[in-house]
Image (spheres, helix red, strand yellow):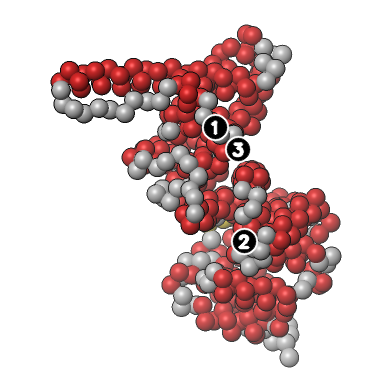
Amino acid sequence: MSDSEVHRTIDAVWRIEAARLIAGLARLVRDVGVAEELAQDALVAALEQWPKEGIPDNPGAWLMATAKHRAIDLLRRKERLAHKLEQLGHELETGASGAAAPAPDAVAERDGTIEDDLLRLVFTACHPVLSTEARVALTLRLLGGLTTDEIARAFLVADSTVAQRIVRAKRTLAKAQVPFEVPQGPELADRLSSVLEVVYLIFNEGYAATAGDDWMRPALCEEALRLGRILAELVPKEPEVHGLVALMEIQASRAAARTGPGGVPVLLLDQDRGRWDQLLIRRGLAALERAQELGGAGGGYALQAAIAACHARARTAAETDWVRIAALYAALARRTPSPVVELNRAVALSMAFGPATGLELVDQLTEEPSLRTYHLLPSVRGDLLARVGRLDEAREEFVRAAALTRNERERAVLLARAADCVQRPGEAGPPP
């Protein structure tokens, strides 16, 4: 095997094993920053040794064993230091005594499966003590195995920005002494909500990029989906986890149909449904059924998944059950009220009962402060105005939406729609 082939293998192994490696080490050393450094040391050792000695039969076990040896060395050094400090303390007769680090062998033999370690790592990386940006960056780094450069490219920010976020996040966790554990009782629900939010943020950024030249970033969708599936295995009795997985599976099933030649966005109703991934749809529907069986049909993610399922089950756009979708949005608005949910509900109402019905609700949102710079508000309003024949107003709304979006593909679509609203002499006016 050539060196380049070995390096490609190491890169693949790292992507698969990094999260488990860091999680297992964090349980030993109780510090995700130190755990990541030890894992990186093992990776460097692999890069040095594998080209000369060959790929081991079990690369993941090799990395874990190498990293654990280094962790144990570290703990022994800390133990000796703690012992020395204790001796000094006695000698000085201060009465103070530092808590020695646990014996390495005993630590290494503690109970806890790899799955438990991974779950602890997920909850630590998504701890609310961190900002949302920091949680996303740290999760992709520790659980996704992405490099700083890869994360920076995915979110179109500078490498240094991501690096600083990760460094500050690890420092904040250490300073706050965030325990490396899965919370229990009521705290579990709150923390799980934070975890799911981070995973869905990653997915959404991949599904509809907020900025840049590309409409989608499939790698981010795949990473979020992978994290969601892992979570579903780790906490199989949490309905909202299955609800989120269902939502992501069904939405991801449309990925191939969401762009046309040259990366041009294709709206949902115009998509070639023959290009939707039926395997992902089946997986999504099964996850939704699981969420409902667990009593989570009314959860926020499960409701959104149920809406996505309505689209997935319709063989053609015309067969979409918009009345059902409008009812699900109404339930979602009661469960998690927000202006964005109301905007989506307006679209559903317009499809179920006519554009005037949807426009009435959208007009109520135009003064909503949180939507002031949200490009989808004028985009939706422009669409509804066009459908009722108020083309001049529709054109203005599409132009305004184009000015607000930071995605070049989306801007082009909106400007094209604005151009379509220019009424030509002799053309029909508003519909009867």
Task: Give the class, few, some or many, for how many residues have Cα within 10 Å of label 3's Cα (few <14, many ≥20).
Answer: some
Q: Which residue is drawn at 57% across and 73% down?
A: 333
Q: Residue at x 52, y 36 (%)?
A: 142
Q: Which residue is drawn at 37% across and 25% down?
A: 101
Q: Mark 1 points at which residue?
A: 111
Q: Which mark is residue 6?
A: none
**Where is residue 74 shown, x and y percent of the image?**
41, 20
Farthest residue, direction top: 52
Dot 1: what SS? loop
Q: Which amino acid does label 3 sit on?
A: Glu
Assign the C terminus to one quadrant of the image.
Answer: bottom right
Of tags 1 and 2, which is closer to the observer?
1
Assign the N terminus to one quadrant of the image.
Answer: top right
Mark 3 vs mark 2: which is more N-terminal? Answer: 3
Q: Name the residue under label 2.
A: 301
Dot 3: what SS? helix
Q: Residue at x 74, y 60 (%)?
A: 289
Is the residue 270 above or below the residue 235 in the image? below
Count of numbered labels shown in the rendering: 3
* Contact flag, marks 3 and 2 (Cβ < 8 Å): no
Residue 75 is left or right of residue 293, and the answer is: left
Mark 1 vs mark 2: which is more N-terminal? Answer: 1
Q: What residue type is labelled 1?
A: Asp
* 215 or 292: nearer the viewer: 292
Give how far apart the Cα atoms at labels 1 and 3 are.
12 Å
Is the residue 408 above or below the residue 63 in the image? below
Give how far apart the Cα atoms at labels 3 and 2 are.
24 Å
* 180 or 267: nearer the viewer: 180
Q: Which mark is residue 115?
A: 3
Dot 2: what SS? helix
